[in-house]
Amino acid sequence: MRHFLDLHTLPPEELRGILTQAAAMKTARTGLPRGTVDDGAPFEGRMVALIFEKPSTRTRVSFDVGARQLGGQTLVLSGKDMQLGHGETIADTARVLSRYVDLIMIRTFEEQTLVELAAHSAVPVINGLTDASHPCQIMADILTFEEHRGPITGAKVVWAGDGNNVCTSFLHAAGQFGFDLTFTGPEVLDPNPDAVAFARGRGVTVTIERDPLKAAEGADLIVTDTWLSMHDPESARQRRHALLRPYQVNNALMAATGRETLFMHCLPAHRGEEATDTVMDGPHSVIFDEAENRLHAQKAIMRWCLRL
Ligand code: CP
C-alpha cells in the first residue's frame, strides 16, 4: 500500500515521478474552468476522506477541489466532530473509515497519530500536516521553484526564522532532491537534528548561520513561515517574536542575496512580522503560485497513492 507520510521515507524517484505528473496535469488543465473533470476521470467512483484536527484554508480546499477534478467525491471531516475527538482510538477510526472510503488525508497534531492511522488503515493515508512535518506543502514548493528557475538540484535554499515542521520537510526534500539548505534563526529554534542529519547523510550541505545577511548570500530561494505555528502555545508569542525579529524577510535580506532570489511562504502569513509587504508582494515572490501548486501536487500524490 502506498501511504504518503513523509518525504524522507519515500524513494526519491517516486517523488520525482509525482512532480512530473503534477506538472503535466497542470499544463493539461490550462485555461479550463476550475470545475472541469480531468480527462479519463481517474477517481470516478472513489471517495476521499479529508480529516482536519487543526484549521486550514489551502489544504482543505486544494484536496477537496483536487479530488473532484479527478472525478472523485470527498468527505471533509472535523476531528472534533468525530468520535476520534471523544475517545475512540485511532486504530478503530482507521479500520472503520477503511470500510467506507478509498483514501484518507489527515491534518493532525502528533506525528504518531498519522503513523498509527496508516498502520491500521486498509486504504492509503496522506499527511496533510502534523506538528512535525508538512510534506505536501514542500512538494508544491519544489514544483513552484522548478517552474520559475528550472531544476532545484544544486540550488541554495535559505530558511529564515523558526526551524518548524515545514522546515523539517524542506530538509527532507533537500536530501531527496539534492539541494543545499542554510538555516538562519535563533539557536533555540534550530531545525530538527534528525532532519538535518538525513539531508547531510544524502550528501547535501546543511549550514546553520546565525547572521541572516551572511546566510542570504548567493541564495536562489528564501523561505520563511509564521513565528508561531499552530502547535505553539499562545503564551510563547512575545518571546518568539523577540527571538525571531532579526530574521524577518525584508528588502535588506533579499538584497543581501546579491541575485534575483525567489521568495516563498507557505501561508497563512502574518504580514509585517516574518516578512514585509514589500517582499510578499514584490517581484520575486511566488507565494500564490505555491498555493495554486498545492492543488496540482496533491492531485498527483493522490493518484500515486491509488496507482490511478
Ligand atoms: N500552507 C497550508 O498548509 O495552509 P493551510 O493551513 O491554510 O492549509
Image (cartoon, rainbow, N blue to C red):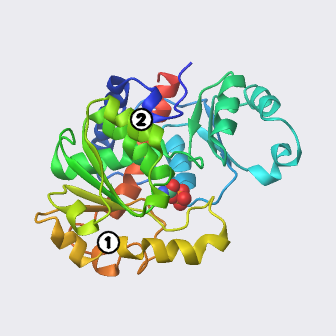
The secondary element bearing badge 2 is classed as: helix
For label 1, the residue is: 249
For label 2, the residue is: 300
> In the drawing, what numbered circle is on residue 233?
none
Q: Position of residue 279 (x, y in %)?
A: 28, 74
Q: Residue 254 occupies which quadrant of the picture? A: bottom left
| Res. 247 in view | yes
**Sequence-first disc among 2 and 1:** 1
Q: Position of residue 304 (x, y in %)?
A: 45, 27
Tell which of 236 and 16 is nearer to you.
236
Residue at image x 88%, y 43%?
87
The answer to whether mark 2 and mark 1 are in CB contact below 8 A is no
Q: Given the current orientation, which residue lies at the most extreme top position?
A: 1
For this view, does 243 lie left or right of residue 125?
A: left
Residue at image x 43%, y 53%?
34
Residue at image x 67%, y 73%?
235
Amino acid at circle 2:
Ala
Q: Position of residue 142 (x, y in %)?
A: 31, 45
Q: Given the current orientation, which residue lies at the most extreme right position?
A: 87
For this view, does 307 lie left or right of residue 123?
A: left
